[in-house]
Image (cartoon, grey):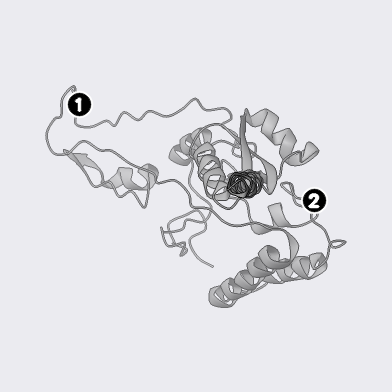
Amino acid sequence: MKKKPIIFALFILSSLIVMSAFNTNTIAQQEPIANLTFKTNGGGVRPDYGLYIAQYLRDIGIEVEVKVEEWVVFLGTLFLTHNYDLGVVTLGGGGATPGARDVWMEAGSLNIFGLGPDLPYGNESEIMQDLSVTLVDPIERQALLYDWQQLMMDKIIPILPLYSSRSYVGLWANTLGYESRWGVADSIPYMSYAGYHDGQDSLDEFNIADANWKELNPLFTDDTSSSFITGLMMEPIVQMNPDYAPLKTGLVYDW
C-alpha cells in the first residue's frame, strides 16, 4: 500500500518531464529560422508587397522586418550600402523604360547589383545581352531575352519579377474618342464632347491635371509628369502603336 503513492509520484514526475520537453520543443519550433530585412521606398504598392512577402515567409519560419524609406535614402541603399536582404524597386526610368543593358550590365547606369563578367555566369550574361541588340527578328530576340532572363534568375542573383499595380483612368461619360492604350497625346485629335458634364463650360478645350513637372528639356527629363508635357508638345522621332509596332506618323515616316 505504501508503494502506490511513490509510483504515482514517479508517474507525475515523468509526466512533468515529458510536458517540459514538449513545451521546450514547441518554443524552439516557434523561433524563426532566419531574420531578414526588407527595404523599399514609400508610395505605390511596394510597401504592401513587403508586408505580403513578410506574411508568407513567416508561415515557413522566416521573420522579415519591413522598412520603408524615402527614395533618396533608399537610393543610397541600392547603390552604396546594400544593407538589406530583400528589396522591391520599380525601375521605370521616368521618361523612358530602361533597357536591360542599363540595369544588368557592368557599365549600366542602373547597375544596382554590382554585376559584371567577374561573377559566375556574368560573362555569358553580357554576351547574350550584346547579341540581343543585334537581332532584327523580334521573335528570335524575345526568345534570346527569355533565355537570358532564366540565366539571370537561376544562376546569378535570386530575383523574381512582381506585378505592376493596376492603372485606372476615369472619364466623364460625355467624353468621346479617348483610347487609353494610345494615351492623351495621341487621342486628342479624335476626342470630342457629347454635351456638357457638371461644372463644364466649354466644348472645345480639355483641362488636364498632373503632378508638378521638373524638366522640359527631353534630354534631361526623368519624371513622368515632365514626359507627359513634352509628349503633348513635341512630335516623336519614331512613333509606335500600343503593340509596339512602328508607324509612319512620326518625324521619321519611312525607312
Identity, as a three-letter code, of the amino acid under mark 1: Ser
Q: Nearer the viewer, mark 2 or mark 1?
A: 2
Choose top left, top right, bottom left or bottom right for residue 249. bottom left
Query: CB atoms at circles 2 and 1 under 8 Å apart?
Result: no
Q: Is residue 243 above or below residue 169?
A: below
Sequence-wise, which precedes: disc 2 or disc 1? 2
Left or right? Give the position of 14 relative to 77.
left
Q: Is residue 230 above or below residue 15?
A: above
Q: Mark 2: few, some, or many residues within 10 Å (few <14, many ≥20)?
A: some
- According to the picture, the residue beneath numbered tag 1 turns out to be 202
What is the three-letter code of the residue carrying label 2? Gly
**Residue 87 visible in this rendered orientation of the protein:** no
Residue most toward the right?
A: 118
Crowding near the residue tagged with mark 1, few <14, some 14–19, many ≥20 C-alpha atoms within 10 Å: few
Q: How many marks?
A: 2
Which is nearer the eye, 250 or 48? 48
Q: Is residue 211 above or below residue 152?
A: above
The mark found on residue 83 in the picture is: none
Q: Nearer the viewer, residue 67 or 237?
A: 67
Provide the residue designation for mark 2.
114
> Is residue 191 among the parts visible in the rendering?
yes
Q: SS of the residue at dot 1?
A: loop
- The percent position of residue 185, horizontal first and vertical second, equals 39, 43
Left or right side of 112 for 146: left
